[in-house]
Amino acid sequence: MSVQAAAVAESAQLTGKATKTERKNLRALSWGHALEWYDWAIFGLLSSYLGAHFFPADSELASTLNALAVFAVGFVARPLGGVIFGSIADRLGRRKIMIFAIAAVAIGSFVMGVLPGYETIGVAAPIIVVAMRLLQGLSAGVEAPLGTAYALELVPNRPGYVSGFFGFFNNLGNLLAPLSIFFLTQMLTGDNLAEWGWRIPFIIGGLFGLMVLWLRTTLPETLDVTAARASMDEKMKQPSVWGDVRKYWLSVLATVFIVGAIQAYNYTWIAGLPNLARAAFQEDPSAVFGITTAFGVFMTLGALFLSRILDRFAMSKVFVVTRLLAIPTIFLALLYTEPGIGGFASVMFGGAIVLLLNMTIFVTISNSLLPQHIRGTGLGLGYGFGVALFGGTASYLLLWLQGEGMFWVFPVYIAILCAISVVLYVLAKNRNGIFVGK
């Protein structure tokens, strides 16, 4: 049996199990991912309430759009955070940067939970909200790409397991967001929820961040920091990190669209459609949050299942097939163009399987296109721009196009992004090869 055949056979026998230490390290990283996704989903889902308190306008839809614009502003800081902190992580280590990232997310969430509204402190309220979103954007710019790269360094032989493990916690964060709001709608009256109840999920996120911060202090460092510092003089004679990033520019560009296309799809499902139902179509909040919670349960358990089987398949082939399937699936959004909770539920679950497959593997696929020594910088750059340009603007664009009577343009836009991502991935893979999986 050839070496390549033996490697394939070994991969096919993987069960997804990991050692106790590996699981402990992955939990310390992935709980931070869960908090990040929880925080961003909470902001998106509660935009109609945030808009009324911090961005008052003549109508509820206008206030919601203002809040979603700030939701998008947080994404603008992601490329900057990814570049700055990813570059530091490639030189001085992963651990400290990951500790900073979770601290920034927790602080931002807690501040927004206790911040007085526009009627109390005036223009300072929206300014502080924007500042907190920018801080969280800097953090998120490095949290997802570097966290996954870090995990793949800690568990290098099981990219499928890492993908599913992180996908489980990412989706758990998305699940806990609507679940917490759903319980609030059952315990509080509509007026109490709108007046002060919406603050509770933000405060919980801030406090939970303290626990994750402690977990991350136990993580080992995967970069040999002593050797890195000792070789600083030698680096002057060798290509810099940025020099290598330029060498792999096609992989970075592919990452922009790999990340951007599926994040636009994702935020359409977890924030855009629920806000369309709530703010534009005036659907019952309990029904909307109940459906989004059930959707989150499916995504969470589905990722856990995928962690057991993904290593049996070539990740590159899985990506191409599932991303191509996303092109027709995004047009399901056109079925929800008028009020009707049944139509909302059908669209949400109709796109769930394809979204699950794509969301579970997209960060690992991005990692696979870059060598280890530039992943922090290259992924921070590509991931940050992808999310900022396409993911963070998706919810706003969806609501705006619906208001302008051009809702049909939105799925066409997402489909084009998905097609471009496949083309660029294949080109980058053929030119530079892949460094994770097969």
Image (spheres, rainbow, N blue to C red):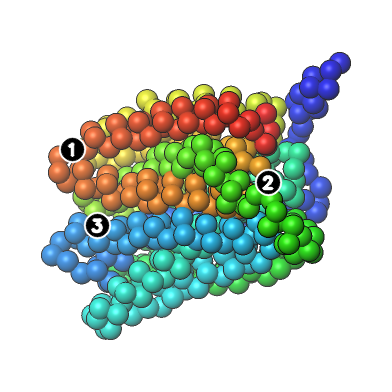
Point out the frontmost of discs 2 and 1: 2
Label 2 element class:
helix
Mark 1 residue crowding within 10 angstroms, few (<14) / some (14–19) / many (20+): few
> In x, y percent, where is residue 286?
34, 54
Q: Which mark is residue 406?
A: 1
For residue 227, side relative to residue 398 (left or right) = right
Front-most of residues 39 and 232: 232
Label 3 element class:
helix
Q: Identify the residue at horizontal 54%, vertical 31% (top origin).
A: 428
Label 3 close to label 2 by CB (< 8 Å): no
Q: Quarter holding the C terminus? A: top right
**Quadrant in the rendering for residue 41:** bottom left
Q: Which residue is mark 3?
A: 65
Q: Identify the residue at horizontal 15%, vertical 44% (top origin).
A: 404
Label 1 element class:
loop
Q: Amino acid at mark 3?
A: Leu
> In x, y percent, where is residue 358?
51, 35
From this viewpoint, which residue is outermost toward the front?
A: 237
Q: Amino acid at mark 2?
A: Gln
Q: Identify the residue at horizontal 33%, vertical 46% (top origin).
A: 394
Point out the frontmost of discs 3 and 2: 2
Mark 2 residue crowding within 10 angstroms, few (<14) / some (14–19) / many (20+): some
Does residue 129 show up? yes
Q: Which mark is residue 372?
A: 2
